[in-house]
Image: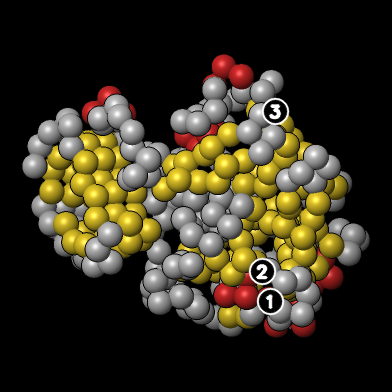
């Protein structure tokens, strides 16, 4: 098919495309398998994207080639965010070849002209020389977001957010230690540096999918050694705490804690778009590579 007024939508859990070339918006509620080349001048959204060997995918996000109409029935609609502070994580594939900027993530919902006044974005940084953590305000809409980071979003008024034009996460169903039959994704979290005498380092991270995930289904691997641990096992090995901290926006804001055992906190789910704090134990993590394995949940 070829058209600049084309939308393809399906809820089929086994959707397949083969040798497609079109302009428009393709939305798959579940997974998409590409068995032939896919040349799309527009945007694609899918819970998971599976590529058969040799398949080439070329996706160009160009909104001029999309229908300017109400796409709410086809978009991954995010949460309604009240004014105040929110810990957020972009539900997208982020890499050198798939960059996501502040404008890419927030720009389709928030007014770019009020960036820095009506809405702000901060990241948590760690100085490996002074061993101190601090907050840095992102001041450029072109600043690239990082795969292993969550961010603070501050709003002066309530907003409805959604995802449009970002590359969906490529889930790996063969990943070692993956707890989901629908695949997993992974990224490296920060670890303490040589000479750090602080007991803990706090990383703002988050989920990467378009559904709720459960902290008890996350896994941890250290130094790519092939041993995958549950959060409780990682705590016993003095790598990270099995407890996470989620933020509940309100007039003052409150933290909600949960762990993977069900003994602490009543809800260990991580919502779509949401970030959370992970506590890294400095006594046994200096200079080590700590990977968080994120499940592709269907909740």
Eye-nearest disc, 1 or 2: 2
Judge whether 129 appears above or below 290 on screen. above
Question: Horizontal placement of 298 versus 68: left or right?
Answer: right
Q: Does residue 214 appear left or right of residue 50 in this picture? A: right
Q: Is residue 298 above or below residue 36?
A: below
* Chain-order first, disc 1 or disc 2: 1
In the rendered image, is residue 87 in sight? yes
Q: Which residue is mark 2?
A: 268
Residue under the point 10% across and 37% down: 2
Q: Nearer the viewer, residue 177 or 290?
A: 177
Image position, residue 155 (x, y; %):
67, 32
The numbered mark at residue 74 is none
Question: In front: 129, or 91?
Answer: 91
For mark 3, give the secondary structure: loop
Q: Position of residue 80 (x, y in %)?
A: 57, 42
Q: Quadrant of the N terminus?
A: top left
Using the numbered discs, state the Cα–Cα distance from disc 1 to disc 3 in whole angstroms.
34 Å
Question: Which label is found at residue 156?
Answer: 3
285 horizontally vs 74: left or right: right
Residue at image point 58% right, 34% down:
159
Q: Is residue 96 visible?
A: no
CA distance for labels 1 and 2: 7 Å
- Disc 1 crowd, CA 10 A, few/some/many (<14, 14-19, 20+): many
| Residue 282 location (% of width, % of height) | 82, 66
Q: Which mark is residue 260?
A: 1
- Asked if marks 1 and 3 touch (Cβ < 8 Å), the reply is no
**As drawn, 182 above or below 119:** below
- How packed is label 3: few (under 14 Cα within 10 Å), some, or many (20 or more)? few
Quarter where residue 218 is shown? bottom right
Q: SS at mark 1?
A: loop
């Amino acid at each position: 098919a070829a058209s600049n007024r084309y939308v393809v939508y399906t809820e089929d859990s086994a959707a397949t495309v083969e040798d497609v070339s079109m302009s428009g918006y393709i939305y798959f509620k579940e997974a998409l398998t590409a068995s032939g080349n896919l040349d799309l001048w527009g945007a694609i959204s899918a819970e998971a994207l599976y590529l058969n060997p040799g398949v080439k995918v070329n996706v160009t996000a160009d909104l001029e080639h999309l229908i300017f109409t109400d796409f709410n029935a086809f978009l991954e609609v995010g949460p309604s965010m009240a004014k105040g502070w929110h810990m957020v994580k972009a539900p997208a594939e982020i890499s050198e070849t798939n960059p996501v900027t502040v404008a890419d993530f927030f720009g389709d919902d928030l007014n770019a002209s009020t960036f820095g006044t009506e809405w702000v974005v901060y990241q948590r940084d760690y100085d490996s020389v002074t061993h101190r953590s601090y907050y840095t305000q992102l001041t450029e809409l072109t600043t690239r977001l990082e795969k292993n980071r969550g961010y603070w979003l501050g709003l002066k008024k309530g907003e409805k957010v959604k995802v449009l034009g970002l590359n969906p996460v490529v889930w790996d169903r063969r990943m070692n230690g993956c707890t989901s039959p629908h695949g997993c994704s992974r990224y490296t979290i920060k670890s303490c540096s040589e000479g750090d005498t602080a007991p803990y380092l706090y990383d703002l991270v988050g989920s990467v999918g378009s559904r709720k995930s459960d902290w008890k289904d996350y896994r941890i691997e250290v130094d790519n050694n092939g041993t995958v641990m549950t959060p409780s096992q990682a705590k016993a090995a003095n790598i990270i705490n099995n407890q996470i901290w989620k933020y509940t926006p309100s007039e003052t804001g409150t933290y909600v804690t949960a762990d993977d055992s069900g003994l602490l906190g009543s809800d260990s789910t991580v919502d779509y778009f949401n970030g959370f704090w992970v506590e890294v134990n400095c006594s046994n993590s200096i200079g080590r590579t700590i990977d968080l394995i994120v499940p592709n949940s269907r909740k």
